[in-house]
Amino acid sequence: MTQISSPSPPGQEAAPAGVPAGKGRRSRRSAWVRDILEVLLIAFILYLVIWNALQTVRVDGTSMVGTLQDQDLLLASKVSYDFGGNPQRGDIVILEPPTDPSRDFIKRVIGLPGDVLEIDGSHGRPEVLIKPGGQGQFQVLQEPYLPTAWTTQDFCCRPDGTASATAQPITIPSGKYWVMGDNRNFSSDSRSFGFVPRKNILAKAFLRIWPLGHFGGLGSGPSLVASPQQATALFLPAGGVVFLEVLRRRQRRRAPPA
């Protein structure tokens, strides 16, 4: 039997032939598969980026009490120092101690390359004294995060950066850092293992993610202020000038008119 198509009315074009139902379903199925593959690919790329840029760190021990507690879970950046940046004073870092690379420690950066550093524990509570970059006078490291009085009679340092029997200033070599735990009375740090090479600093901790009740940043860092001796040395000359000026003004007021 011959099939005859119905002609279109004058002025109208014939409607295009429809797509077979089976072929339409296959096209929609292919589009869904393509979308799913794209999402999976993006998720995989993000996973690789996060895996290589970030790591979670579980605090094991009490050497950072004051800022961190035992079993806190932290997020650390593995790329913070990979693009021209270097560890800064006060950074909380994940590191391999030079005496035992099989273990990772978490400590705070105290001394930077080129700093002159000294700890004098002979006056009760020890203080960290630093000449930033080896220039100027010693300044006292103010550390509001310390949990309790630092009572161990610490002195620093030997030429390798470890604690010494008496206070001896040292210059931190290029490419090396000096670190301490915030819980000074119970911390194995540069006082024990000395300077830390830059390559041994693996990541910078920046966020506490567990417990949820303490979720957030890791607090403020230290600051450098003039030592009491330096402040006195600056004050005495200024005080003398003020005193002489007061005497001069009093004498002028007492002088009889010409």
Image (cartoon, helix red, strand yellow):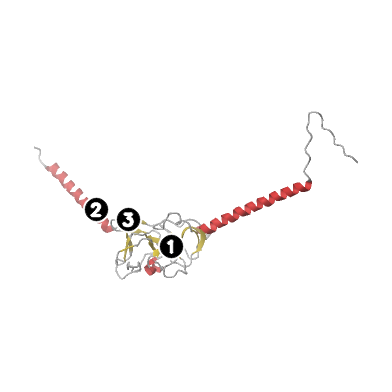
Name the image quarter holding residue 175: bottom left
Kind of element beneath mark 2: helix
Please name whichever residue, 90 or 251, is drawn nearer the observer in this view of the structure.
90
Q: How crowded is mark 2: few (under 14 residues within 10 Å), some or many (20 or more)?
A: few
Identify the residue at the far front of this view.
2
Q: Does 89 sit above or below residue 104?
A: above
The disc placed on residue 225 is: 3
Q: Position of residue 2 (x, y in %)?
A: 89, 39
Q: Earlier in the sequence, mark 1 or mark 3?
A: 1
Q: Which of marks 2 and 3 is nearer the N terminus?
A: 3
Q: Name the residue under label 2.
A: 235
Q: Does 70 sit above or below residue 10?
A: below
Give the residue type at disc 2. Phe
Name the image quarter holding residue 177: bottom left
Q: Mark 1 points at which residue?
A: 199
Q: Which of the two marks, 1 or 3, is nearer to us in this view?
A: 1
Q: Where is residue 114 in the image (x, y as percent from the top left)?
A: 34, 59
Q: Does 78 sit above or below residue 159?
A: above
**Label 2 to label 1: alpha-carbon separation:** 43 Å
Is residue 49 among what the camera can see? Answer: yes
Give the residue type at disc 3. Val
Quadrant (top left/top right/bottom left/bottom right) for the C terminus: top left
**Label 1 to label 3: alpha-carbon separation:** 30 Å
